[in-house]
Image (cartoon, rainbow, N blue to C red):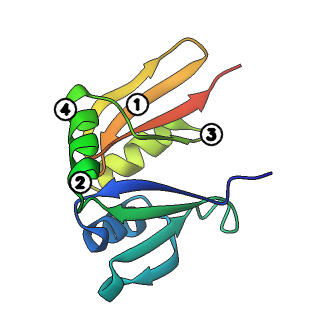
Amino acid sequence: MKIKLTSIFVHDPAQAFQFYTEKLGFISRLYLPQARLAIVASPEEPNGTGLLLEPNDNPLAKTYQEGLFNAGYPVIVFSTEDIHKEFERLKQQGVVFRKEPTQADIGIEAVFEDSCGNLIQLYQLVP
């Protein structure tokens, strides 16, 4: 069994699609702006797990998303082989970081805003 698709709630799927493709460098798997549907994937694994950028237009989703954001909890973790290089690249793209790369128990972590109501953790495993 494999994870093929997962989702995160966003304020606006079109804005999220733009951020995830233009700032983060993800590739488009499916984009139907008129249907408010956007799925992106990592360019490193184009056939890997897709990320559905799901509108938060129901009250439960909006409350959940805002609660996590206000509490400072990331909604998803992205991994990288070189967190410092990725941190610098994303800063150059204008990505807002809440936490710069910091040593954690078994790796290095950073946290950034996705401009769509979410915090994302960037992680590098350090053996």
Looking at the picture, does residue 103 appear above or below residue 78? Answer: above
Residue placed under numbered mark 3 in the picture = 81
Residue placed under numbered mark 4 in the picture = 70
Earlier along the polypeptide chain: callout 3 or callout 2? 3
Q: Nearer the viewer, mark 3 or mark 1?
A: 1
**Residue at point 61% right, 16% down?**
106
Q: Quadrant of residue 80?
A: top right
Please state the horizontal and vertical placement of residue 6, each as a whole percent of the image: 54, 55
> Is 19 left, or right, of 83 in this rendering?
left
**Residue at point 31% right, 69% down?**
13
Front-most of residues 77 and 53? 53
Type of amino acid under label 4: Asn
Q: Nearer the viewer, mark 3 or mark 4?
A: 4
Type of amino acid under label 1: Ala
Secondary structure, mark 2, is loop
Secondary structure, mark 4, is helix
> Is 39 left, or right, of 98 in this rendering?
right
